[in-house]
């Protein structure tokens, strides 16, 4: 099966671009670069148009004249590949409910769709259906329907996404979880004993059986440092939890490290202003953007992952999958697809970004979860091998 992949790979680096990169690598890369290689075992030939409209995170969703020119350039590449290699299947990642991003999608569909037999949408972002119904004007909604639907195949990450796929009258909808290479393949030998030991230590403390020196618990936030992603809600929750622990006279203190870039100068200024308070600076720090060994070190040294996001396009974020792979107990919000990622009745879900519920969840999860349950959830549902096999099976159905 030949597939025209109209999507960008990093940079800029975020979950969607990373998953596109993993898909291309998993299916053997751009077929133009492996002409003499044998057919891929999963039966896919990908022809890639690296449709990179933004140079960095701050450019995403911004209206710029150069982006309009890029749309025409990328579409021209797609049409050349269509006829040069007889590629009839068009793979595209649609935008969430953002007006400027949808302008881009309209133009791409208008220019490319008539020349391809099948259109495949991969819903990495969520919320378009609700946005069209509740915020978009009638003309905007009508244009989206006219240029998109019907869709031959929609790939969704969860049951929550079905609303987006059904809004565009998808002929077929398949659930395909995200998946990544295991970042902690030595978990059983090295990290599981450490997680168990830290958990048993916390249990003794909460049961009043601990008599040693005060314990420091490391809480990790790893994402773009924005209010919408939950950075400031996480800080407020940490401070509230520490006050509660002090009130209960428990020898336990939470320390918070945020890893990731700030997207706006205003939010960075707000963060720096909070650090002027000595009480905040004593328990909160910023590691900046991390990758490679430093990123792995933070995951290994953390005791809990905190991500109270309310980001508009949040769906199945890679950072949560990575935290699960490292066996980290985690706290996140009941937002979009996030509850479906976790085990049933998992105690680490909060309704919103209020500090008190986050603080209560922090105390509860630290006392009740070792992290082994979410590690099992990762190995059962979010490995790269499972992701690629399920994705390939779904893609082949479009040509049945």
Image: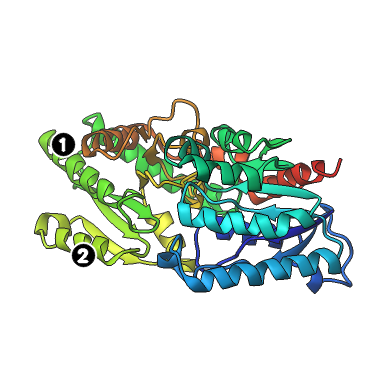
- Circle 1 sits in a helix, a strand or a loop, which is it? helix
Query: Reading the chain from its start, which is encountered first: label 1 or label 2?
Result: 1
Classify residue 309 as left or right of residue 21.
left
Vertical comparison of 176 with 208: above or below: below
* Number of marks in the rendered image: 2
Residue 382, above or below 297? above
> Element type at marker 2?
helix
Nearer to us in this view, 345 or 57: 57
CA–CA distance in space, label 1 to label 2: 28 Å
Question: Local crowd at mark 2 within 10 Å, few (<14), some, or many (≥20)?
Answer: few
Q: Which mark is residue 244?
A: 1
Q: Residue at x 86, y 71 (%)?
A: 35
| In-image side of 234 versus 109 (left or right) | left
Is residue 247 or residue 154 the one in the foreground? 154
Which quarter of the picture shows residue 300? Answer: bottom left
Q: Which residue is mark 2?
A: 269
Rendered image quadrant of residue 47? bottom right
**Which residue is drawn at the image coordinates 58% and 32% (left, top)?**
159
The colour scheme of the drawn protein is rainbow
Q: Residue at the location (46% across, 40% down)?
A: 131
Where residue 237 appears, as percent x and y from the top left, is 23, 43
- Residue 196 in sight here: yes
Foreground tag (1 vs 2): 2
Q: Is residue 359 above or below residue 216?
A: above
């Amino acid at each position: 099966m030949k597939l025209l992949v109209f999507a960008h790979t990093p940079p800029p680096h975020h979950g969607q671009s990373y998953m596109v990169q993993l898909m291309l690598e998993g299916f053997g890369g751009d077929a133009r670069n492996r002409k003499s290689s044998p057919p891929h075992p999963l039966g896919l030939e990908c022809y890639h148009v690296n449709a990179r409209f933004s140079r960095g995170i701050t450019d995403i969703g911004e209206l710029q004249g150069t982006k309009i020119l890029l749309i025409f350039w990328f579409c021209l590449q797609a049409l050349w590949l269509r006829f040069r290699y007889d590629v009839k299947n068009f793979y595209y990642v649609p935008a969430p409910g953002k007006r400027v991003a949808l302008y881009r999608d309209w133009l791409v569909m208008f220019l490319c769709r008539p020349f391809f037999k099948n259109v495949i949408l991969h819903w990495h972002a969520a919320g378009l259906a609700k946005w069209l119904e509740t915020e978009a004007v009638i003309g905007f909604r009508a244009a989206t329907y006219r240029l998109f639907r019907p869709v031959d195949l929609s790939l969704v990450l969860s049951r929550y996404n079905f609303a987006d796929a059904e809004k565009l009258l998808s002929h077929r909808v398949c659930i395909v979880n995200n998946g990544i290479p295991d970042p902690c393949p030595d978990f059983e030998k090295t990290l599981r004993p450490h997680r168990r030991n830290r958990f048993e230590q916390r249990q003794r403390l909460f049961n009043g059986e601990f008599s040693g020196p005060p314990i420091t618990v490391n809480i990790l936030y790893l994402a773009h440092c924005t209010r919408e992603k939950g950075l400031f809600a996480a800080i407020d929750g940490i401070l509230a939890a520490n006050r509660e622990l002090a009130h209960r006279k428990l020898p336990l203190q939470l320390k918070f490290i945020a890893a990731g870039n700030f997207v706006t100068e205003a939010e960075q200024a707000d963060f720096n202003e909070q650090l002027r308070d000595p009480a905040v600076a004593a328990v909160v720090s910023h590691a900046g953007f991390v990758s490679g060994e430093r990123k792995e070190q933070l995951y290994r040294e953390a005791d809990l992952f905190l991500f109270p996001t309310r980001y508009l396009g949040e769906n199945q974020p890679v950072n949560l999958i990575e935290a699960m792979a490292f066996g980290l107990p985690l706290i996140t919000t009941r937002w979009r697809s996030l509850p479906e990622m976790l085990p049933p009745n998992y105690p680490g879900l909060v309704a919103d970004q209020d500090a008190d519920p986050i603080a209560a969840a922090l105390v509860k999860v630290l006392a009740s979860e070792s992290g082994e349950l979410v590690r099992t959830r990762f190995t059962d549902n979010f490995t790269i091998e499972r992701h690629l096999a399920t994705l390939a099976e779904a893609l082949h159905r479009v040509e049945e």
